[in-house]
Amino acid sequence: MIRLSVNINKIATLRNARGGNVPDLIKAAKNIERFGAQGITVHPRPDERHIRYHDVYELKKVLSTEFNIEGNPREKKFIDLVMDVNPHQVTLVPDEEGQITSDHGWDTVKHKEYLRETIAQFKSKGIRVSIFVDANTTMIKGAANTGTDRIELYTEEYARLYPTEKENVILKFSEAAKEAHKLGLGVNAGHDLNLENLRYFKSHIPELKEVSIGHALISDALYFGLENTIQMYLRQLQ
């Protein structure tokens, strides 16, 4: 079964636009679990422009499904947060300061030693580690040398080319997933996956364990309702 982890950053963005607690992030996360999602993802950034560090602690108290915290481990504050909260999974993303959204994976060759040291910290607490990588077999092989448990394939290129070149672009993702599996790595995926392109991706990546989806899913919920939208995404993964 491929797990659906819902990234709730956009709910926090809407809340922060007016201050106060509307919409209620904690209530929304609990409802997302109740509606069938198998996980919750958050990606706190240093400026706390959406998910706040306080939110992460509050979510930890109430979540009953898998909790995945994404972020850049170059921030000591982020490392301290993850070590303190002890989520099921941490996903390491090489964001730059002020970056609007994630737009590239790790250079796992150049940053091998840094990643090895950082990953070892999290694994010492029993936290499963995934690292964000492009669909590049060299980077996949490099990831296997860092001690990570999983990789998360950065799927922006797949989503962008899906309308015109899906048969070609899926090949590199399939190759990357096969290489990861061969090397003993679990395969997650995320970024711009949506109701239009998710089923095709899933059907061509049998190694896939988990997808993390936020922007598209929360946007679809404006049209279809949150419960119905989650069920629609889960059907794409069946």
Image (tube, grey):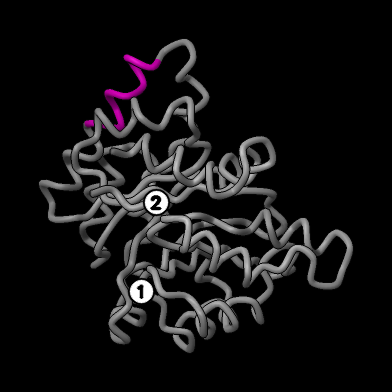
For mark 1, give the secondary structure. Answer: loop
Instruction: Give the class, few, some or many, for how many residues have Cα within 10 Å of label 2's Cα (few <14, many ≥20).
Output: many
Q: Residue at x 62, y 63 (%)?
A: 28
Image-based side of 56 in relation to 12, left or right:
left
For mark 2, give the secondary structure. Answer: strand
Residue at label 1?
88
Amino acid type assigned to the residue bearing label 1 in the image: His
Residues under numbered marks 2 and 1 in contact, where contact means CB atoms less than 8 Å apart: no
Q: Main secondary structure of the magenta part?
A: helix
Residue at label 2?
4
x and y percentages locating residue 30 in the rendered image: 54, 68
Above or below, 45 against 238 in this view is below
Residue 213 numbered tag: none
Whether 194 is among the magenta residues is no
x and y percentages locating residue 56 in the rendered image: 58, 77
x and y percentages locating residue 106 in the rendered image: 42, 52
User: What is the total number of numbered labels drawn onto the structure image?
Assistant: 2
Quadrant into which the C terminus falls? top left
